[in-house]
Image: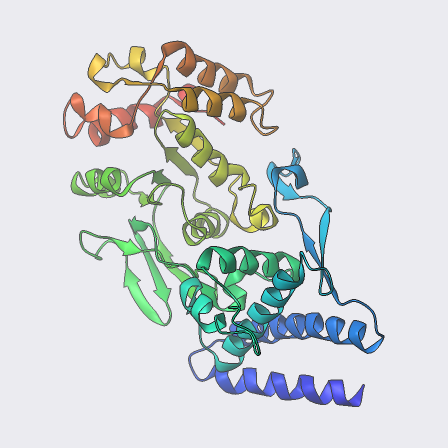
């Protein structure tokens, strides 16, 4: 016990030393906690080996078969099914080693007070296995799932493991925030807006001042650019964000934080197609592969304001907006209808069946066939005014 305590004390000293002047007390405490979890994983492996037992890792299964929808919380949650990853199982030995290797690299990052991209972590973990011609990792496609496995195994988020992804998504609007010690006015960030980083936790980003009334989240940067040029954020005193398609974790987490901490409603303007419906589902209820993070990322109160399959008639759109549905679209739409978080919602069932009945889908950009400024000046204001058209 004394040796373990000494090791732990040494590790915590390294974390504290690496924290430096810029890291907050919150960040330091979180780093120590994550380090303890990683050490606990290593100790469980060493304990099994010392008892001449097969070292094993119990990895929660990240698949549709192991997720459930919690109607009370209105989010997707991970189930209790796990996969045993044993060192002496030939089918699992490599993944066992890879998991331990990634855990060791993450512990080193925390102790150094550094962060690395998922690509950098792949290269830091890649090398020849001693005495063989085998590589620890043959591609990043092997290492990325291991990072997520490690997250769920020790109940620590990727951001807490000091691993980040590429920035994706932008924000503009009347909010001033502090990012890594720098105060930024998001009304004055230029034509690209504030680029939302991968790590947006309170120890990195703090909200200083905000007068926005709501958040309008759009699917693509091209649509975001349209709203930016038309000064929608100024006219309607709101924050406009985009996620570059399905929003990355940083954007989803930031939406959740702004909703919770600033009490801002989140309205989604997405394409009228199965992909747009799914993106809304991910923002609102969480994703299947990241079900263990839904409680931090999902915004159950988010509303879908368009584009609706009924808008073709409502707004007198021309045939130029139509994009024919293919077999994949139909199959995906039926799949979404059967998701527990869509099933039984009559308005959503009506919406999706209407799209299939129409035989076509529509992109948000297609509404500019009316006029380039139509989205910002007429369509969205009309949607915001008529809440009966919103989908929950």
Q: Quadrant of residue 30?
A: bottom right
Q: Residue at x 46, y 77 (%)?
A: 23
- Residue 367: horizontal and vertical position, in percent? 23, 24
Residue 66 vs residue 371, the one in the foreground: 66
- Residue 315: horizontal and vertical position, in percent? 27, 15
- Residue 196: horizontal and vertical position, in percent? 35, 56
Q: Quadrant of residue 41?
A: bottom right
Q: Residue at x 53, y 81 (%)?
A: 111
Taking the image as drawn, is residue 174 in sight? yes
Q: Image check: 376 left or right of 216? A: left
Q: In which quarter of the image is residue 317?
A: top left
Q: Which residue lies furthest to the left in this view?
A: 371
- Residue 316 to residue 32: above or below: above
- Residue 178 to residue 282: above or below: below
Residue 169 vs residue 325, the one in the foreground: 325
Residue 391 vs residue 351, the one in the foreground: 351
- Residue 298 to residue 37: above or below: above
The mark total stands at 0
Q: Image check: 40 left or right of 277? A: right
Q: Which residue is drawn at 30% across and 10% down?
A: 313
Q: Image check: 42 left or right of 19? A: right
Taking the image as drawn, is residue 318 in sight? no
Q: Residue furthest right?
A: 51
- Residue 96: horizontal and vertical position, in percent? 65, 63
Residue 89 vs residue 154, the one in the foreground: 89
- Residue 359 to residue 3: above or below: above
Figure quadrant of the N terminus: bottom right
């Amino acid at each position: 016990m004394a040796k373990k305590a000494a090791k732990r004390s040494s590790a915590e000293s390294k974390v504290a030393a690496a924290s430096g002047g810029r890291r907050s007390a919150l960040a330091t405490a979180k780093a120590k906690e994550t380090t303890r979890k990683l050490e606990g994983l290593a100790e469980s492996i060493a304990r099994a080996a010392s008892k001449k037992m097969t070292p094993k890792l119990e990895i929660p299964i990240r698949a549709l078969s192991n997720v459930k929808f919690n109607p009370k919380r209105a989010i997707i949650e991970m189930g209790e099914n796990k996969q045993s990853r044993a060192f002496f199982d030939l089918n699992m030995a490599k993944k066992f080693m890879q998991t331990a290797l990634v855990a060791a690299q993450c512990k080193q990052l925390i102790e150094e007070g550094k962060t690395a991209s998922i690509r950098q972590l792949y290269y830091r973990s890649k090398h020849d296995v001693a005495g063989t011609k085998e590589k620890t990792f043959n591609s990043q496609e092997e290492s990325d799932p291991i990072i997520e496995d490690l997250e769920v195994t020790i109940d620590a988020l990727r951001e807490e493991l000091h691993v980040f992804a590429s920035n994706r998504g932008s924000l503009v609007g009347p909010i001033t925030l502090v990012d890594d010690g720098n105060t930024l006015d998001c009304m004055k960030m230029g034509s690209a807006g504030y680029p939302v980083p991968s790590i947006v936790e309170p120890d990195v980003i703090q909200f200083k001042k905000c007068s926005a009334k709501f958040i309008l989240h759009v699917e693509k940067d091209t649509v975001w650019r349209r709203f930016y040029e038309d000064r929608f954020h100024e006219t309607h005193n709101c924050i406009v964000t985009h996620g570059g398609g399905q929003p990355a974790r940083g954007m989803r987490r930031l939406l959740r934080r702004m909703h919770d901490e600033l009490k801002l409603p989140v309205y989604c303007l997405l394409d009228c197609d199965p992909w747009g419906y799914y993106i809304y589902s991910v923002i609102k209820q969480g994703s299947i592969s990241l079900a263990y993070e839904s409680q931090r990322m999902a915004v159950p109160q988010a509303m879908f304001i368009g584009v609706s399959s009924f808008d073709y008639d409502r707004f007198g759109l021309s045939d130029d907006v139509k994009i024919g549905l293919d077999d994949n679209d139909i199959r995906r739409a039926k799949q979404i209808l059967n998701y527990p978080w869509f099933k039984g919602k009559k308005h959503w069932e009506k919406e999706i069946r209407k799209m299939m009945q129409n035989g076509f889908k529509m992109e948000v950009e297609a509404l500019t066939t009316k006029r380039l400024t139509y989205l910002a000046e007429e369509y969205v204001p009309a949607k915001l005014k008529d809440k009966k058209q919103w989908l929950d």
